[in-house]
Image (tube, rainbow, N blue to C red):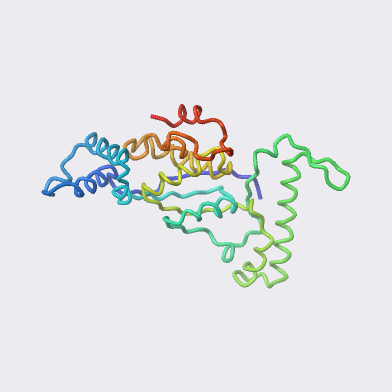
Amino acid sequence: MKPVSSKVTLVSFTPDPEGIIAAAGKLCYAAETDDIFAHRPQEARRLVQQLRSWGHLSPLEHASFTFLLEGVSRALTHQLVRHRIASYSQRSQRYVEEGDFDYIVPPRLRGTVVRYRGKEWEGEDFFRRTMEMIGERYRALDLALGGRGRSSHEDARYLLPNACESKIFVTMNARELLHFFGERLCNRAQWEIREVAQKMLDLLRPAYPGIFGGAGPKCIERGRCPEGKRSCGKFEEMKRTYGQ
């Protein structure tokens, strides 16, 4: 058992995604379709940017990207799978024994003091000891239930915390990724999924600026924060960070 942090790997994607999107966009407007693939990379990039500026986003759905997320919590994956226009394959807690699970520690615990049963604990140490206790009790319960794989794991897992580390494959098309970034790069998003979204964008934007240039929290696309009184108040900072 140990604390871990997120790792994001881009494992697969549609070959020449900007070219495919550009061809799909051309098809919508061309009477003759023989030359819809006849474009240089820079021309394809400009056309993708133009499609985005028009709000014609359906061609972006023809390009998809698959990521492997590791070192992420169950708290994160519960949020992630709410993005329904995507495909997911996640490590099972029913089939995989989790007695020595790794875990994610919220950064805010650093420097905090927890007062518990008349003692003061450093926040990260209190958290670590709690994870170890849960691991011990998971192993004891799993053994009491027979210790026979699926039949015992499926009930012992009820003890596992949201901090428990998970691994998940995620496939999204480019249009859904732009929506995902808009929601999850917002300062009001939960810290862990915001961190993972940023790592995903960092892998995509340099390679495919026609698709992902200027991608960021939804205030960037809309030109204003839509959160009203709940705004973080950092719109200008977000423009400097994500604006083109």
- The one nearer the camera, 105 or 181, is 181
Residue 23 position in % (x across, y down): 21, 46
Q: Is residue 235 shown above or below 85?
A: above
Q: Residue at x 72, y 46 (%)?
A: 127
Residue 150 position in % (x across, y down): 59, 70
Residue 151 position in % (x across, y down): 62, 72
On screen, residue 184 versus residue 147, left or right, reads left
Q: Is residue 133 shown above or below 197?
A: below
Q: Is residue 156 shown above or below 32?
A: below
On screen, residue 116 versus residue 170, left or right, reads right
Figure quadrant of residue 141: bottom right
Q: Residue at x 60, y 44 (%)?
A: 4
Residue, far front: 228
- The one nearer the camera, 197 or 31, is 31
On screen, residue 216 versus residue 74, left or right, reads left
Figure quadrant of residue 92: bottom right
Residue 83 position in % (x across, y down): 47, 53
Query: Where does the C terminus fall, quadrant-wise?
Result: top left
Q: Is residue 94 shown above or below 101?
A: below
Residue, far right: 118
